[in-house]
Amino acid sequence: MAFILGIESSCDETAAAVVEDGRRVASSVVSSQTDVHGKYGGVVPELASREHLRAIVPVVREAMEQASVTWDNLAAVAVTAGPGLVGSLLVGITYAKAIASVRRLPLIGVNHIEGHIHAVLMEARGQVEFPALALVASGGHTHLFSVTGSLEYGLLGKTRDDAAGEAYDKVAKLLGFGYPGGPVLDQLAPFGDASALPLPLARMKGNALDFSFSGLKTAMLRWVESQDMQAEINARRDFLRAHPRPTLDEWLALTPVPARNAIAAFQRVVIEELLRRVEAVIADQDFRCVVISGGVACNRGLRSAAGRLPVPAFFPTPGLSTDNAAMIAAAAFPKLARGELSDLTLRAKANLTLA
């Protein structure tokens, strides 16, 4: 029995979790900074670092208490080493180093993207067959990997500009839905006609498995500019300031049919961009299943559309799709078994690669 304390602070979520043997989540605590960054329409790095400093101690303490473990029960401390915001990463890494040093525990640095993959492997243990294809889509990442049974990763494609989740949030902000806006667009998409607005698919030169969402984002901007809808956008922004958490019915009342159609078309293209590359790889290589993780994996449209894939597709539960520390602890377990430990020279790496 090996309990690992995981710490995650790569962006704007301060998280800690205790996971037993890489498979059972004994506790998972996440402190969100949404209210802090929402007024700015996106994450402000300096504010994120400050909030991590405030939250890290109580979040770790709560994770330990919920798991009913003491420092003596821990087999290791795992922490996100990157990629992410350097200032945010430093808070988690510094705290993890302090724990490891004082308690004389093994320290394990974990790649944030690998953590997202392990969020699925942990929950679908015994069901995922290898070689597997992994799609990690979030606000900061859109990557496609091959994954072997020995947990070796091969990068097949990545975004050249915006990540899928970033495109969602930027389009939502453009339309007056605030930040984070991806979940709102996902809620509204079924109420529109996706065929009412033709939007472009990306045409990639070079690696056809790479992603690009900047053209789609620009197409949405041009559409908004062509419409007489500034008063409508302002009405949504004003309502959001007065009612920070609108219901779906309230959003529907504030969103006329043309905007609903544009949202549906946008979501259709994002999903098509993601899944057509997955399908291209499966058609060319022998993958037994697909693992889809990251914040965008919460998207109900994507989860539904994945049913068209010719191999099984596995998603994490919503709580493990977005940034969390349980996935970091789960990814650390095989590293602990192999003796792949870090030392106190572990550094934050904003652009840490997985393969």
Image (spheres, rainbow, N blue to C red):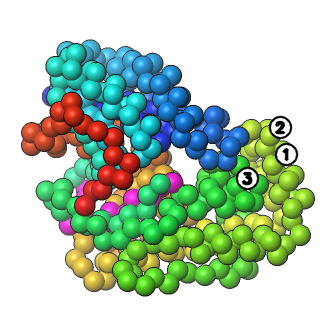
Q: Are marks 2 and 1 in contact (CB under 8 Å)?
A: yes
Tag 2 secondary structure: helix
Q: Which dot marks residue 242?
A: 2
- Picture layout, residue 56 above or below residue 234: above
Residue sitting at x 52%, y 80%: 202
- Kind of residue at badge 2: Ala
* Residue at image point 76% right, 54% down: 176
Of the numbered discs in the image, which one, if any, rests on residue 20? Answer: none
Magenta residues span 127-139
**Is residue 91 one of those drawn in magenta?**
no
| Residue named by callout 3 | 177
Kindly identify the amino acid type of the residue bearing the numbered disc 3: Phe
How far, Cα to Cα, is label 2 from label 3? 13 Å
Which residue is nearer to you in this view: 100 or 62? 100
Crowding near the residue tagged with mark 2, few <14, some 14–19, many ≥20 C-alpha atoms within 10 Å: few
Q: Position of residue 324 (x, y in %)?
A: 41, 39
- Quickly name the residue at label 1: 238
Residue in the image at 32% along x and 52% along y: 352
